[in-house]
Image (cartoon, rainbow, N blue to C red):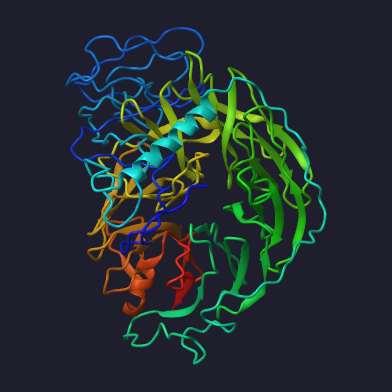
Amino acid sequence: MSQPPNQPPQGGFGAPQDPRQGGFGAPPPQQGDAPQTPPAPQQGDAAQPPPPPQGAPQTPPPPQGPPQAPPPPQGPPPGSPQQPGYGYPQQPGQAAPYGQQPGPYSSGPYAQPPQQPGPYGQPQPAPYGQQPAQGYGYPPPQYPGAPGPGSRNPFKGKPALVIGAAVAALVVIGGTVFAVTRGSDDQDKKPVAQQSDDPKGSPSPTGSGDGGGADGGSDPEDLNEGRQSGESKVLWYKEAPDAPGSGADAPGLWITDKAAVKAAYKQVFAYNVGDGGETWDPITFPEKICAVTPEKSSGDKIVVAYMSGSSDRAKCNQLQQIDLNTGEKGWKGTVGDGALFDSTLDVELSITGKTLMVGRSQSGTAYDIDSGDKLWDKTRYGDKCFPDAFAGGEKLIAVASCDATGTNEHDEVQELDPATGKAKWTRKFQKGWKVARVYSMDPLVIYSTNEDKKAWNISTFGAGGKFRSQVSVDINIGAKCGWAILQRDLLGCTGVAADGDTLYLPTDATTSANEIVAINLANGKEKWRVKSPVEEPMLPIKVEDGKLIAYVQPSYDAGGQVVSIPVTGSSHTPAKLLQNPAGTANIENGFFSSVFDWVDGRFYLASTRLSGNDESKEKLMLAFGK
């Protein structure tokens, strides 16, 4: 796994982010470059995107027959001022258009048979102002002072070493993902469902003590000292465990009615949501944790993967089920490699219903989350399609790289039946377009990028995988997305939220107020936008009881805020739910990288990467409330 810089920069939200951020997936459109409009997927029964606005170039007549990749654009060469390019995941039986943009339907969302939505990619103006993305278009590394999506030169002022490391990582990805044509047969297919005998007890991290009350006399520092009227309390805080000097991952954050659970390096900790006392003894693994399920099951179970050893040949293939409420360890097992080039050097874990999905580099295996019994394999299919990424939650999604060494290279997205692994639907993206992130599972919202065209696209899909809309809003996206090296890390973005009808995206701003833009998922158009109440960025967390909950980041002399924003009506003014103490602003700003959540009136802020700096004690987690 890549390591953070030896001297991480200081300041900024969540402070210096792991240089891995900005990798396989999230958008840094570049300011000043012309916006682009990207892909609409293809499928026979898919709902069609809207017709182009007046004056848009017309698409050639669609070919007859099965779906196929589009021919090269006809007419003006790419890059000419009036030609926005070509591309888009297309609808079956339609050639990709060359210049059409989505427009309104005549009546109802699917009343008028529309033309294929417009191209994506050429660096020139498009009606909706999408900005071309740098590289793969993923959000840039989020160190303080690093250029955001709106910056023209994303590498200005950055050490050449960091840039070289990023490029080297992409080369590795290319060699691993695209140079393979063989299938994958799963080895050692079923983990042995047995009670674990790994050590369970370890010292609790220091900081707030066993009782956890931040305003108690036993604390080494009182984070509530000097708290002003109207400011929230630090309910409790925890310091991080020791980590190696090169740093360590601290993935996951799970909140139940009883416990706030956090993984860090080789341990999993559980704290009482009210006072921070230990809910159960920390669980210690023999090697570092390398993957976790972002979700918890309906029975409050998670699965943690840890390394098979500490050598360079160690694999991320050891699985352990954990009960979040009790700390009991259930079944454990080992995930075998697949065929040639299909390894478990790194894995992705996700839960959908009662299905645990374990994704390798080119295939996946599903297990019963409660028993550990193997359910099915997802391996090579069709046109040399290798499933190399999975995402779970309300649905189970697989993304495959197809014909990577041939002329028909493309990505495909499938929704899988979690019980059987059967594909419910398949959607093909055109050559050059990579599925980078999933912004929402329900509704399904996919962010894709085109490196050659330096463009990005956000598309929404309805029941049966039918194309619903694509975002047509002028926006530099400010979502916080981790760096993905060996994986796409489909669900690796925070600061994005969605409900059934609306996608909520933050605009990019690193040192001043930004906006949250509400986008209508029926047509991809803007509903409304609201500015941060202070001169600091604001990020969506979730939609709750008809209101969008958002986190306003701290400044150097003021704590962060949690606000609620009405999602309907004419007023969308943020209302303050919590104002964190000014005395903790430096801690809020000081995480190497962070994750946050709002549950039952409490705001949780936790680290996702430990710097390993021995000169100062890092905070692992804080809980704020009234």
Q: Is residue 83 left or right of residue 250?
A: left
Q: Quadrant of the C terminus?
A: bottom left
Question: Residue 335's spot in the image, x, y percent?
Answer: 72, 42
Toward the viewer: 434 or 500?
A: 434
Question: Residue 180's spot in the image, x, y percent?
Answer: 57, 23
Q: Is residue 424 left or right of residue 558?
A: right
Residue 459 visible in the current orientation? no
Toward the viewer: 322 or 522?
A: 322
Q: Is residue 527 left or right of residue 547?
A: left
Q: Quadrant of residue 29?
A: top left
Residue reaching furthest to the bottom = 217
Above/below status of 589 relative to 233: above
Residue beneath the point at 69% across and 36% down: 337
Residue beneath the point at 34% across and 27% down: 50
Q: Is residue 351 left or right of residue 533?
A: right
Residue beneath the point at 29% across and 59% down: 537
Question: Residue 230's spot in the image, x, y percent?
Answer: 33, 82
